[in-house]
Amino acid sequence: MPGSADAQTREGPFWPRLLDALVKLQAKVPADARSSATLGTEREGTGIVIDNDGLVLTIGYVMLEASEVTLGLPGGRTVPASIVAYDYETGFGLVRAAVATGVKPIELGQSATVKERDPVLVAAHGGSEAAMGAYIVSRREFAGYWEYLLDDALFTAPPHPRFGGAALLDKDGKLVGVGSLIVPNALVEPQVPGNMFLPIDLLKPILGDLLATGRSSLPRRPWLGLWTQEVMGRLFVSRVVEGSPAAQAGLEPGDLVLALAGRPVAGLADFYRRLWALGEPGVTVSLQVLKGNTPTDLTLKAGDRYDWLKLNRSL
């Protein structure tokens, strides 16, 4: 597959036009932003033009809490952009070019139809040199340590090094995913490295809300500010976000999460689903954790991640 996709990229009738819709997205983030310590203040990724009015889809962490966004277009032209929306639950971000780009958008496909072993093209900004053939090697649940869960993520191999916001294109040149991560286990058995993509079908039900208000209208999820690593089904605290409900409750790195609401925790995904099922931000959360050799019961008032982030920057 890599050879055939590379050939299509350089010689196929529609690939060059499609690749023009992939732009360089650069964001400047204030030093006091919540995400600056982990993601930096100068960020770069790929943006995907998805309508005729300069709407650009990307992975949200590239433009999260940004104060300035610019788009690098084919031919070297650079234009300013404004932030349209950020959705933490899916991970998508949207910006819009402030002036006409003249770029023809990529059509949204159907990620539900993508199957394991399907050949795909993974493409970042930069034309054919930034595009490579790959395969869908897995579709499965993905749980991230930062209180993030996808029920059905897309995994590809071999890995593309410029994955942030990269376009996942099916054989018809339609967009079926947006690049999020490089992972060591895109294929679990045997373990093969690759990339994780957000399925484009997750965007469609919320796109209207994102364009209208910048947020999804779905109920907000309770947030603890607790980063955890799953080791053989056990949840170890790796970081506690400063100023978060978890920090206020006294949780510390090295603690082991034993139970939520009186029931043992069976892995990261189980923890998130049960936490979010408790209600919306403000709900009371009961945890039992192991501090050293001492089981400790803690009560937290869950917060709202959107209130904690500094999203209302004036661009």
Image: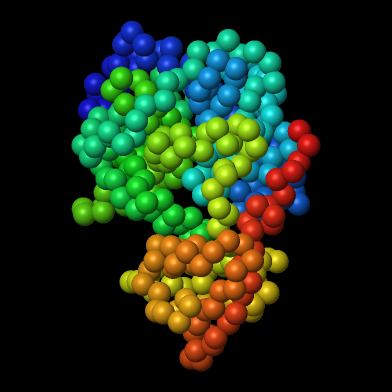
Q: Quadrant of the image for the N terminus?
A: top left
| Percent x, y of residue 199 | 39, 39
What colouring style does the render use?
Answer: rainbow
- Seen as rendered, the residue at the extreme right is 314
Residue at point 50%, 62% (across, down): 276
Q: Quadrant of residue 76?
A: top right
Q: Is 215 above or below relative to 73?
A: below
- Seen as rendered, the residue at the extreme top is 13
Q: How many marks?
A: 0
> Image check: 25 left or right of 187?
right
Q: Quadrant of residue 122?
A: top left
Residue sitting nearer the eye, 206 or 25: 206
Residue sitting nearer the eye, 142 or 277: 277
Q: Is 279 above or below relative to 65?
A: below
| Percent x, y of residue 227 | 53, 65
Is residue 43 visible in the rendered structure shown here?
no
Q: Quadrant of the image for the C terminus?
A: top right
> Image check: 82 left or right of 278?
right
Q: Is 92 above or below relative to 47?
A: below
| Percent x, y of residue 177 | 40, 34
Residue at point 70%, 66% (across, down): 243
> Image check: 10 left or right of 223?
left
Residue at point 42%, 16% (across, down): 18
Residue sitting nearer the eye, 58 or 264: 264
| Percent x, y of residue 125 | 50, 25
Is residue 276 visible in the rendered structure shown here?
yes
Residue at point 49%, 17% (across, down): 105
